[in-house]
Image (cartoon, rainbow, N blue to C red):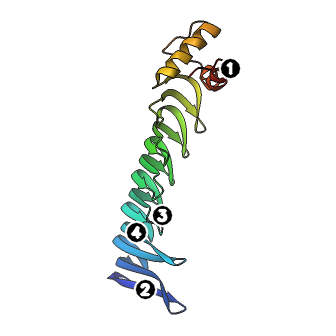
Amino acid sequence: MSGKGVLEVFADDKRTLRFEGTMRSGRAEGPGKVEAAVKDDTERYDGGFTNGFFEGYGAYELSDGSRYEGGFRNDKPDGFGVYKGTDGNIYQGEIKDGQPQGKGFRVWPNGEQYEGAFVKGKQQGTGTLLFPNGDVNEGQFGDDKANGAGKFTAATKGQMNLNRRITRLFGKVDPNFQNYQIVCCSIRIKKLYAIT
């Protein structure tokens, strides 16, 4: 089957798939649209196809309303793209094999934002994490956590007083390089010395 047209697939008198576009040797080729039944809802793709696979630029809408728009390769997001989830998750950046890979920007539902390097979908390498309260963590990340050299900048005066108390307790802390272990233990120190 070759040429431009519409292909519909039915199961138990319900349409499970609808493709509109060009086909070559029975496979989608070039620009096209597909709607697929998923449980009691529908997922949609509008974009390029090669040999039946999502390929090139396209937009995919999941059954919950989440949406990805960008590059595809072999049915997976690949290249540069933007994902917007209905839960508030957002990712914009480089993607490889369906996962963030390279430089990107991510926002979580709680308001945290990360801009930097990703490896296999995780924060890995140099990046900046901005917390909803305005605190900023710049530096090295590994396996989605601060890991290695970095700088933590607090947004509140109370945290600045805490940093002074840490300096008195542990010696001078270079403001351009702060040991993450000191930052991580700040909550315990805050409780010990009743710092607000």
Seen at 38% across and 77% down, the residue is 24
- Residue beneath disc 1: 192
Looking at this view, name the residue that lies furthest to the bottom.
Answer: 13
Given the image, on which type of amino acid does mark 3 rest? Asp
Check disc 4: other Cα within 10 Å, few if <14, some if 14-19, many if 20+. Answer: many
Q: Position of residue 161 (x, y in %)?
A: 52, 16
Residue of label 4: 45
- Label pair 2/1, CB-CB below 8 angstroms: no
Q: Say which label, 2 or 4, has the lower sequence index.
A: 2
**Residue type marked 1:** Leu
Name the residue tied to disc 3.
Answer: 75
Q: Nearer the viewer, mark 2 or mark 1?
A: 1
Q: Which of marks 3 and 4 precedes in the sequence?
A: 4
**184 vs 66: above or below:** above
Q: Nearer the viewer, residue 182 or 80?
A: 182
Q: Secondary structure at mark 3?
A: loop
Q: CA distance from mark 3 to mark 1?
A: 54 Å
> Can you tell which quarter of the image residue 19 is in?
bottom left
* Callout 4 amino acid: Tyr
In this figure, which residue is indicated by the disc labeled 2?
8
